[in-house]
Image (cartoon, helix red, strand yellow):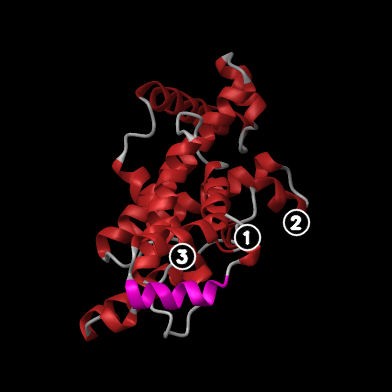
Amino acid sequence: MDTENIDVEQLWQDWITTHETDVANRLVSFYMYLVDYHTQRVSVHLPKSVQRDDIKSLALLGLYDAIKKFEPARDLKFDTYASFRIRGAIIDGLRKEDWLPRSSRDRTKKIETAAQHLLQTLQREPTVKEIAEYLDVAVSDVEDSVKDQLFSNLLSIEEKAKDQNEDFKEGIGHSVIDNQQLTPEDSILKQENYQDLANAIKQLNKNEQLVVSLFYHDELTFTEIGQVLTLTTSRISQIHKQAVFKLRGYIES
């Protein structure tokens, strides 16, 4: 579909008037770049066991949902609204699947145990290379396990937030609210959720706050964040892991 010659405003008018499947499909084709973008951004942080095509399917469901529920009359750009819906659909889909194999869980547990042992021995955070040498495994195996665990922690925070309120879709730094559908009681609870999260983030040190902001709000990769803060990618990974661990503790306390 040649999106350059599409009158998207007319498409929206046709959709509002007719709600025909063909019009919805044309809107989906026009906004497929959002599906591709968020699929790529999320896939970077997923273990290899998760297929990118599966993520794209979840993202596509989110786009369909966004088109069905979007109200053009409201003061909100569709790209922004759809991005929240797409990311929310991906997170919901991952949460429902056993995305981390048992072998990966066992390997992650061994690496965590080794990291704790080396932390006590070295009196500092061990490097990925030191953990790999201690376990006599490849550095890439350790890096993959760290990525698995980081995303597991992220899903835990997402799930905790979702359990508290169904509309709180995006966890740290990403949320969208339909205030027209909230009761006064829900609105109060929503504000309490935000306040709790804001207070938790304030408890982090400066580097942890920066990494959380750059990763979840600005959507930079660990490598890009490392370039901004002049730190190695592995160090950014460590800071992120510490921040997520602390936030999960604050939220659950």
- SS under mark 2: helix
The earlier-in-sequence mark between 2 and 1 is 1
Mark 3 touches mark 2? (CB < 8 Å): no
The crowd level at tag 1 (other Cα within 10 Å; few <14, some 14-19, many 20+) is some
Give the residue number, with chain letter if any, for mark 3. Answer: 82
- Please give the name of the residue rendered at 60% of the width and 43% of the height, measured from the top-left corner: 237
Mark 2 touches mark 1? (CB < 8 Å): yes
Q: Nearer the viewer, mark 3 or mark 2?
A: 3
Give the extent of the magenta segment: 7-18
The earlier-in-sequence mark between 3 and 1 is 3
Q: Nearer the viewer, residue 103 or 97?
A: 97
Give the residue number, with chain letter if any, for mark 1. Answer: 214
Give the residue number, with chain letter if any, for mark 2. Answer: 228
Report, in whole angstroms, how far the alpha carbon at label 3 lies from the one at label 2.
Answer: 28 Å
| Residue 31 can be seen, yes or no | no
The earlier-in-sequence mark between 3 and 2 is 3
Q: Nearer the viewer, residue 154 or 82?
A: 82
Report, in whole angstroms, how far the alpha carbon at label 3 lies from the one at label 1.
Answer: 21 Å
